[in-house]
Image (cartoon, rainbow, N blue to C red):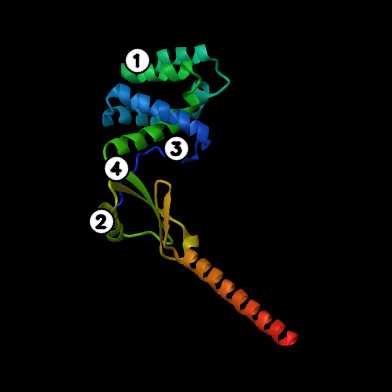
Amino acid sequence: MADAPPKTRPDHVLEDPSAKAVARIYAQAYLNATGGTSEALDEFTSFVDEVVQAFPDFARILTGEITGREEKLRLIERVVAPRATPLFTSFLRVLGEHDRLNLLPLILGEAWLEYEQRNGKQRVTVRSAAPLSEEQLQRIKTRLDAALPSEPILQPVVDESLIGGLVIQVGDTVHDGSVRTRLKNLGHRLKEKYVHEIQCGRNRFSHSEGN
C-alpha cells in the first residue's frame, strides 16, 4: 500500500542545491525548536498549503522581493501572529529577518524528510509504466521492508516511457529493472558483439592478405 506523502510537495521549488542546503538547516532548526512533533509540521504544512499557495497575492507580498524586510515582519505580526502558535510565528520572524521567506515550501519539504528519517522512515520512489495496484504496492513494500533499515514510504510514479518493469529509487540509489533499460542494455551488448565480430573478420582478412 502506498503511504500518503505530505500534502505539500516542494520538488518544483528552488531545486538549486545551495538553496536546498540552506533549507535543510532551517528545517532541522525548526524541528529541534518544536521538539520534532508532527503537530508542528502540520501547522507548517497548513500555513504553506492553505495560506501561501492558496493566496498568491499574499504570498508575493510575504515572500517576494517587492516587499521590504520590515514590511514583511509587520505583516507577520498583523496577519500570522494572532492565528499561529508563538513558536511558528517566531520561526517566520527569523526567516523574515534573514530574507529566507521565499524558501518556505522548500524548508517544509526538507522538514518532512528530516522528520521521517528521525522516525525511522525512508521515501522510496517507485516508477512504473502503468499504475500499480494496492496489492502490487504492498508486495513491493514488504520486500523493501526486509531489505532496508528504515520503513519505506512508497511514492508511486507513472512513467509510460518505461514500457514495463520498475525503477525503484531509495535516496540517491536507483535500481533500474525497467524494460526500456533492459532493451537499451541488450542493444549495447549486441552492438559490441557485432563490432567485435567485424573486427575479428577484418583481422583474419588482413592476416590472410599478408600471407
- Under mark 3, the amino acid is Pro
The residue at the point 39 percent across, 30 percent down is 50
Measured from the top left, where is residue 149 in percent x and y? 27, 47
Viewer-side residue, 79 vs 44 = 44
* Residue that numbered label 2 is attached to: 142
Q: Which mark is residue 10?
A: 3
Mark 2 closeness class: few <14, some 14–19, many ≥20 residues within 10 Å: some
Q: Which mark is residue 82?
A: 1
The mark nearer the N terminus, 2 or 1, is: 1
Q: CA distance from mark 3 to mark 2?
A: 28 Å
Viewer-side residue, 205 vs 47 = 205
The mark nearer the N terminus, 1 or 4, is: 1
Viewer-side residue, 105 vs 24 = 24
Circle 2 SS class: helix
Q: Nearer the viewer, mark 2 or mark 1?
A: 2
- Under mark 1, the amino acid is Pro
Q: Nearer the viewer, mark 3 or mark 2?
A: 2
Q: In the figure, is residue 177 to the left or right of 133?
A: right
Q: Nearer the viewer, mark 1 or mark 4?
A: 4
Measured from the top left, where is residue 79 in percent x and y? 41, 17
Circle 4 SS class: strand
The mark nearer the N terminus, 3 or 4, is: 3
Residues tagged 4 and 2 counted as in contact (Cβ below 8 A): no
- Under mark 4, the amino acid is Lys
Circle 3 SS class: helix
- Work out which quarter of the rendered image holds the C terminus and state it: bottom right
Q: CA distance from mark 1 to mark 4?
A: 34 Å
